[in-house]
Amino acid sequence: MSKFQSPTGMGDLFEEDLKYFQKIERVCQEMADFYGFQRIETPILEETGLFVKGTGVTTDVVQKQMFSFRTRGGDQLTLRPEGTPAIVRAYIQHGMQSLPKPVKLWYFGPFFRYERPQAGRYRQFYSFGFESLGGGAPVIDAQIIQIFYNILKTLGIRNLIVEINSIGDSQCRPYFKKSLVSYLRSHRASLCSDCKRRLRENPLRILDCKQEKCQRVVRGAPQILDHLCKDCHDHFKNVLEFLEELELPYSLNPYLVRGLDYYTRTVFEFFKDSNPSTTPASPVPKQHSKDALVGGGRYDGLIKLLGGKETPACGGACGVERVVNLIKSKQKGIGKGLEAKIFLAQVGQLPKRKALKLFEEFRRARIKLAASFDKDSLSTQLKIADKLKIPYTLILGQKEALREEIIIREMASGKQKIVPIKRIVREMKKKIKK
């Protein structure tokens, strides 16, 4: 008989890893509380059309990576591949456009993409994101970047670099695209098969290709920074000035576009800097780890595209597994929770009943205990306490239970002391403090 296994690229999470996830979530919550972001949970399933229209029909996410299916009722649904379109859908659906601006939301949860599983890249993966809807000022872009930077630094991740670019808007980007297409057509033979298709459908995506042959072509391509209109140029200049004032390390990457269609103006990605310097900003991209930890930017046209009013917005998302892997690689443990220093051993039915009640008294006193209620042998229980390296064992046998007494045993020395059960919580509290 065959054994069932988890689907490819979708693993189980156990206590050891969940401690890291919970730590990251706590830091996100603390940062959200400080900056005034409210948590939101959107459904794991959304209408497929939301991502086709919002993320972009020509993006790799929509064309290659979505888990989509038709329900028995005929609805076409998709496991969410990213967070922003769902946030925007909720913003419109629940009338949040009438709230004071900007509306600041954050999330933490699982997402799904069909791609080849590898370290830090899974088919079910976790992300957290921060979105600011309704604010168009450059300071919003800078503060979103600051929040992600603060979270990663709080988690002990050092030598971060923010790659940043502006991809303009609907006013200036068409002129750049003409110049870019003209250049890329003259180098079409050197592009990969995907980029040859992108040249017809969405040429900006070629700038995002990771194939070395395409990157060689891209390095000689026109730069969008040279084609920005005055409004986009001024906006980007102000964003960079804010980052410099905050002393956040960034480098300009004129070929950074991100892989999603809804971005306008500012786009950014976070990497581990493999060659940190004391200079906060650099005019050229630096050498860094391959995969981005954080990605985001401004998406001023998405809310209107999905049926709302024209509304500026900015946000980003961070891959949780990649952060966990980085913390582990630096051997920065999350730290253990409350450790048991007392083992409660019980032999017989009456002692077990009294021990169960006593266990709750220790819980109310916020003193953690260990116990094996399913074991009847005292020697077996003492071996378990010894294996757990617990310094004190409380022994409750039939005689002790009838006399309302309990034995305190020091595991290292073997010394024992009998005390009334009603005093045991106070007694152990003193011993633990010592």
Image (cartoon, rainbow, N blue to C red):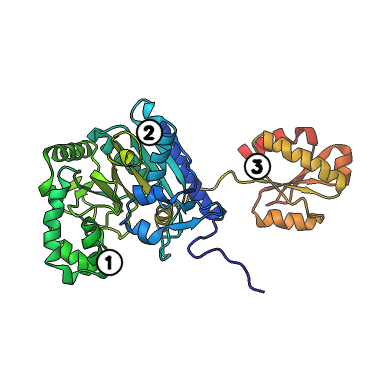
Would you call the spot at circle 3 few (<14 residues within 10 Å), some (14-19), or many (20 or more)?
some
Q: What residue is shown at x 73% (from left), y 40% (from top)? A: 359
Q: Earlier in the sequence, mark 3 or mark 1?
A: 1
Q: CA distance from mark 2 to mark 3?
A: 39 Å
Give me the disc on residue 194: 1
Give me the disc on residue 104: 2
Q: Where in the figure is residue 47, as x and y percent of width and height?
A: 45, 48
Residue 351 placement, left or right of 41: right
Q: In the orientation shown, which residue stands out farthest toward the front?
A: 74
Q: Where in the figure is residue 177, as x and y percent of width and height?
A: 16, 53
- Circles 2 and 3 in contact, beta carbons < 8 Å: no
Q: Nearer the viewer, residue 295 or 56?
A: 56
Q: What residue is shown at x 52% (from left), y 49% (from top)? A: 19
Give me the disc on residue 320: none
Q: Earlier in the sequence, mark 2 or mark 1?
A: 2
Residue 1 placement, left or right of 117: right
Q: Where in the figure is residue 139, as x and y percent of width and height?
A: 25, 34
Secondary structure under tag 1 reads helix
Which marked residue is nearer to the observer: mark 2 or mark 3? 2
Q: Nearer the viewer, residue 31 or 413?
A: 31
Would you call the spot at circle 1 few (<14 residues within 10 Å), some (14-19), or many (20 or more)?
few
Which marked residue is nearer to the observer: mark 2 or mark 1? 1
Would you call the spot at circle 2 few (<14 residues within 10 Å), some (14-19), or many (20 or more)?
many
At label 3, the amino acid type is Lys
Secondary structure under tag 3 reads loop
Q: Which residue in the structure is indicated by mark 3?
A: 368
Which marked residue is nearer to the observer: mark 3 or mark 1? 1
Q: CA distance from mark 2 to mark 1?
A: 37 Å
- Circles 2 and 1 in contact, beta carbons < 8 Å: no
At label 2, the amino acid type is Lys
Q: What residue is shown at x 18% (from left), y 71% (from top)? A: 190
